[in-house]
Structures are given as structure tokens and as C-alpha cells.
Image (spheres, grey):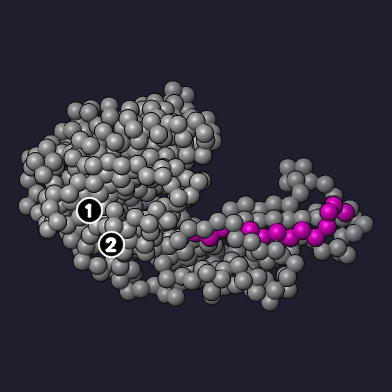
Amino acid sequence: MIPTELLAKAQAHVDSGAFFAELATLVGYPTVSDAPEGRVAIKAYLDDVLTPALTALGCAVATYPNPDPAGGPFLVGTRVESPERPTLLCYGHADVVGEAGQWSDGLDPWTLTADGDRWYGRGTADNKGQHLINLTALRLLLAEQGSLGFNLKFLFETGEEIGSPGLTEFAAEHKELLRADVLIASDGPRLDSATPTLFLGARGSVRIALDVDLRPGSYHSGNWGGLLRNPATTLAAAIACLVDGHGRIQVPELLPPGLPGTVRAALAGVVVANSPGDPVPDSGWGDPRLTAAERLYGWNTLEVLALGAADVDRPVNAIPGRARAVLQLRYVAGTDVGGIAEVVKKRLAEHGFPMVEVTIDGSFKASRTPVDDPWVSWAKSTLDAVADRPVALLPNFGGGLPNHVFTDVLGLPTLWLPHSYPGCLQHAPDEHLLASVAREGVVLATALFHALGQRG
């Protein structure tokens, strides 16, 4: 049984303003991982913020170099209470994205600003606010009991926003250091702002670049139209034989082998795009055999991210010489993407488009913990007992996280308890954390960690 006094203290910690004040300090570090000055801020963040926070939890703390020169260091805190107790691995990332737009008047990305329920600042939702919630919950539990009831390992990386370079290699080289029984971490959004959520993994992604480069220059459409192959027309038709005009993938090899019954059951009744301001899903888009939740969390999509030929804003009467597009396959665990370039090339050649060059220019892996894993039912029942409304269980969320490092490399069941929501504007101007979600998040995380200690 989770003590009500402990949960009351978790609520009071946020209501007192202490959480806001601490988050303001974290936001003040411009830890942008793709900028030299950001790397300096990252080191300061590790030294000034995270190391003291982990030390206060009784952790031995060490910084490790990244085996990939493109990435930054890793920070690991370890607290061992007893070899007989379960070991929890937590994860967070210290880096944030850079600024690519103008924030609203009165808002600054590096200054935490409250406006009603919204707390604005870069990293509030992704990921400083989220890992601060978990650090706070661990701190409250330790203060209440004098012990956690489990062993703790906390891994922070510093390059998640640039694709987690070196994380897979680091985990493979340090399996004993990171050995644990379960991962509990927080990143990404919950189903919506009002629904506590537990998800078990992430979809993967493959970027597919298509290039129809037929000639070095453009030719007058009146003099040469009907004689010269138009690369833009060719590209449009090539895309249509991969994904049709209703968003339905046309290549069987780009689809998952099926929708598992456990996944379908978990998604039954899940409503997507349910927050104020969310766009309305388009009827008739995507596979009509699937619900909206199944299309988003249980299936693959092929999206056109960019498409262009010549100058659309200033067209001239000429057949362009080149057309290009970038597509993205979002895919669920179980999809074989090892030979995707060859699959796409073959499909295009079969439809008369061998002149389309295909390259893969970026990817990350899909993974998820099985829905019927015992750790999942334990976490779901624990959270259901604390939340005042049903907790959504998602087999994976729609975006990408380095979850495969924990499932595939370290062999861990993974439980993600997100403390953000889809409208948080992460990676965009005016990123924010909802105070109400932060308050509930501290309570839920405290309850889950307490239950883990009792399980031990």
C-alpha cells in the first residue's frame, strides 16, 4: 500500500514552488548538443546540476567518454543497497535542441516563465522537466524511508537530440555497469494532457531520399514539352507507387508482418488527438482496416517530408532538370528494414522508374517490451491504483527514442512514464511543461518507485 502521506508530500513539493525554482535553474543552462558553446553548457550541467543531484541520492557518480567522437560524455550514478534487491535503471538526456524560430513576446528559451498552467522554457518538456520529476520522486522516497528499497542506476546521455551517437556502443561496452532488472524512464508525450500514460517502446524511422537528376539544366516547355522526361512528373509517379494519395503503403515489404493481438487489445478504446488545439485526423487517410490508435501506435507509415523541383514561388516556363524528395518510414518492431534501399529500388524499377536514385540518409531502430511482460502488468496496476482516471497503455509511442539500446543491447523490460503531452511544442518555439502534468507526474513516479521498493 502506498502511504497517502508520501503522495501528499509529492503534491506539496510542486505546489510549494520548490519544483519550479529547481527547474528554472536547469532551464538556464543552454545545453544545445549541436553547438560548440552548447557542449560547454552540457559539461557545466553535468558538473553543477546532475552530479550533485545523484550524489544527494547516495550514488557514486562517474563521467565516461563517448566512444563516438560525434557525441558527448555519459554520466552514470550508482547506488547499491543490497545484492538481494532489484536494480532499477533510469535514463534521461541532458541536451536540448537549438533555436530555430522566434519565441512569443515575453518568453525566452533559457528563462522559465509561468503563464497559467504552462511553464515555458527550452527543455521543460524535453527532457529536463521529465528527468527532474524522476529525480524529485527518488529524493522524496529516500527522505521518507531512509532507503529506496532497490538498487539504483541512473544514466544520462548528452546527445539524444542529435541521434544518440555512441549510446549503443557505450551500452555494449558497459553491460555490467548498466546491468539491471528493469528500465523506468520518462521522455516523449503521454497520450494527451489529461491521460496518464505508460508506453513500452518506440517506433523506428528510416529516411529515404529520392533523386531524379536527368540533365544539368532546364529546357523551355514549349519547345521541348512532350519530348523530354520531366523529373518532377517522374518523381510524383514514383512516390505514388510507394504510398498512394490516401496515405496507404503500396509495398508489402514496408509493412509490419501483422498487428499482434496483445497490441490490438492494449489499443482498444484509446482515443488519439483528444486535446484542445490538436488537428482533426483526416477521414479516409491511412489503412481503413485500422483504428486511429492502431495506425499511430501499431502500424507503419510512409510520409513525404520534403518535395521539390525548380522554384515553386517563381516558376518559369521550363522543364526542370532535377527533382528530389525525402520520405520517412515510421515503423514498428517486427518490421525488417535491413534491405529497404534494395526493396524501394526494385519496386521503382518494376514500375518503370529505374532512373530514380534511392539513398538511405538516416535511421533509428524500433523496439518495444511485450505487452504481456509481467513488469508491464505490475506497473499498470500500480499506476491505476494511484491515478484518479484510467492509465493508457501504449505498446510504443509514435515517435523515436533509443529504447532498443535497453531492450536489445541490455536485455531489459522498458517502462516509459512520460510527463509531457503532444502539444508541448518540443523542438519548436514556446516549448512548455504543464504544471498540472508535472504535479501528477511527481505523484505517479513516487508511487511507482515506492511500489518497486516494496516489490524488492
Magenta region, residue range: 205-219
Which x, y percent locates residue 446?
17, 45
Of the 4 image quadrants, the one containing the C terminus is bottom left
**Is tag 1's residue or tag 2's residue first in the polypeptide sequence?**
1
Residue 384 appearing in the image:
no
The residue under the point 85% across, 52% down is 217
Which x, y percent locates residue 157?
38, 45
Marks 1 and 2: which is nearer the front? 1
In the displayed structure image, the side of residue 187 where residue 256 appears, left or right: right
Residue 188 appearing in the image:
yes
The residue under the point 66% across, 63% down is 358
Magenta region includes residue 212: yes
In the displayed structure image, the side of residue 330 where residue 137 appears, left or right: left
Task: Find disc 2 in the rendering and name its residue.
Answer: 413
Residue sitting at the far top: 106
User: Disc 1 residue type?
Assistant: Leu
Task: Find disc 1 in the rendering and name its residue.
Answer: 88
The residue under the point 30% across, 71% down is 262
Which x, y percent locates residue 145?
8, 42
